Image (cartoon, rainbow, N blue to C red):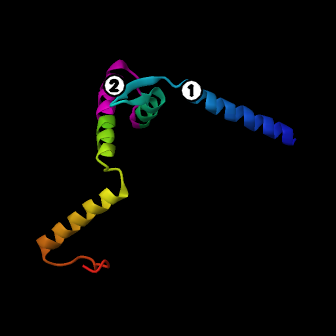
Amino acid sequence: MKQLLLITFAAFASLLFAQNGTDPVLMTIKGTPIHKSEFEYLYNKNNAQNTLDKKSLAEYLVLFENFKMKVLEAEALGMDTGRYAASVWRRTLLRREQQTGASEIQRTDGE
């Protein structure tokens, strides 16, 4: 019984690894390969009507390409880190305090 379970697990694992090697590159943006499976997943996720025609696919391809370029640009600028998000939040809070003249939260960092 254990051998059958081990053989079944090994078969499934080999199928998973075999599929990763056959996923074709759909496009390359700023040197980063974008695989067909990523595009298909997001297209199917965002396609609420479940229609597949050339027009909707072509329109989504343009949107997808713009989206990926923005993501890569944000990553290059370090905007995908928690430190960046915290600094944006802090600037927003300070701006709000200046506009209202009152502190909305009690600071704990000694300022």
For residue 103, above or below residue 25? below
Question: Disc 1 designates what residue?
Answer: 21
Query: At which x and y percent is residue 32?
Result: 39, 32
Residue ID for mark 2: 56
Q: Quadrant of the C terminus?
A: bottom left
Q: Residue at x 33, y 25 (%)?
A: 56
Q: Position of residue 1 (x, y in %)?
A: 87, 41
Q: Position of residue 96 (x, y in %)?
A: 17, 69
The structure residue drawn at horizontal position 31% and vertical position 58%, both measured from the top left corner, is 85
Q: Is residue 14 left or right of residue 74?
A: right
User: Magenta stretch?
Assistant: 46-66
Q: Image point 27% across, 77% down: which residue?
A: 105
Horizontal and vertical percent position of residue 46: 39, 36
Relative depth, front residue between 49 and 57: 57
Question: Residue 72 is drawn in which quadrant?
Answer: top left
What amino acid is found at the position of numbered circle 2 in the picture? Ser
Whether 110 is among the magenta residues is no
Q: Quadrant of residue 5?
A: top right
Secondary structure under badge 1?
helix
Which type of secondary structure does the marked residue at label 2 adopt? helix
Which amino acid type is shown beneath numbered disc 1?
Gly
Residue 26 in sight from this viewpoint: yes
Q: CA distance from mark 2 to mark 1?
A: 28 Å
Q: Residues within 10 Å of mark 1 (few under 14, many from 20)?
A: few
Residue 94 bears which disc, if any? none
- The mark closer to the camera, 2 or 1, is 1
The majority secondary structure of the magenta stretch comes to helix
Q: Is residue 53 magenta?
A: yes
